[in-house]
Amino acid sequence: MAKEQKNEVMEKVVALCKRRGFIYPSFDIYGGLAGFYDYGPLGVALKKNITNMWWKQFVTDREDVLGVDTVEVTKKEVLEASGHVGGFVDPMVECEKCKRRFREDQLEEKEKCSECGGKLGAPRQFNMMLKTHVGATEGDASVAYLRPETAQGIFSNFKNVVDSFHPKLPFGIAQIGKAFRNEIAPRDFLFRVRELEQMEVEYFVKEADWKPAFEMWRKEVLAFIGAIGIDTGKVSELEVPDGDRAHYSRRTIDFEFEFPFGRKELYGLAYRTDYDLRNHENASGVNQKFVDEDIDEPFIPHVIEPSLGVGRSLLAVLLSAYTEDEMNGEVRTYLKFKPSVAPVK
């Protein structure tokens, strides 16, 4: 399909979402706010069906995964330990003429502004976390952040869950929740936004068992893709090479989808090693080691993380369901959902 036709499909889906009450631009009557969207009546029904199916498959139907729901405001010390304060950055450039800002690694033209043709300045690192203050005074001691991922709430509750439920390895802790990223250039509708919702499992294993656990979760993600009606013919797996992986990952697979704007990441599956729990133990001084009856010495478990975005799931489902055909000489447009996720049944 030609690029113009693909862009036309995307425009039609975006227009349909607003017209039919799936997705609205946030604060539309005030001109909107880039990177933020609200779900209308049909959109929230579709979203609930997707998240409920994920929770059933990844949590309820399993005996080795427990659920939590952690806060969105996160202590600075947590994100310092996780590496986000120092490393959650994207390269940013600014046009010297019109002052627009872009992610340098996403530009086709590195020297000139795509909007006005002006010269682009030197790239600099931009931290994407949204900062806030907790309490009545503002200062370094009151700094907190809106969480950039749901994972750290799980890791900081690892010891609580172990002490309460005494699970045996392997086991997982899961949650669905909001995350916030101050994207330099939000774009492509629900694909790159500043407020997003994640469905994540942190699955704790012995280091020697990480490979079979990784493969098990790879199959679970693929099964979920088919279950919610995403066109599997447009899905591929990318083994992320060294240098392109997140700072915590030893192995990552991106499940990519053929969006109208290109083949992009839909979901991720990462082997986070013992990076997070070890760093939180060092920073907090609280023992995060696990006692296993088969191993003499307490140890810090390693982690496999399937991470799925709600908004990207919904966008891929909508694009997969979008259908045009002709009847009585007229083109009709409709969404051909899988019954399990259809907002109206």
Image (spheres, rainbow, N blue to C red):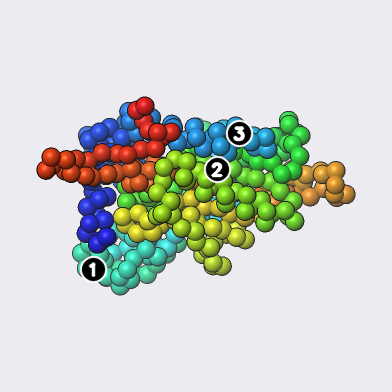
* Residue farthest left in this picture: 329
User: Which amino acid lies under the numbered mark 3 shown in the image of this protein?
Assistant: Asp
Label 1 secondary element: loop
Residue named by callout 1: 118
Residue at 37% in and 69% down: 122
Q: Marks 1 and 3: in contact by CB < 8 Å?
A: no
Residue named by callout 2: 200
* Residue farthest bottom in this picture: 111
User: Which amino acid lies under the numbered mark 2 shown in the image of this protein?
Assistant: Glu
Name the N-terminal-most of marks 3 and 2: 3
Name the N-terminal-most of marks 3 and 1: 3
Residue at 41% in and 42% down: 229
Give the quadrant of the C terminus. Answer: top left
The x, y position of residue 310, in whole percent, is 44, 41
Tell me: 53 left or right of 21.
right
* The label number, if any, that marks residue 166 in the structure image: none
Label 3 secondary element: loop
Residue at 71% in and 48% down: 205
Residue at 52% in and 49% down: 222
Q: Toward the viewer: 225 or 287?
A: 225
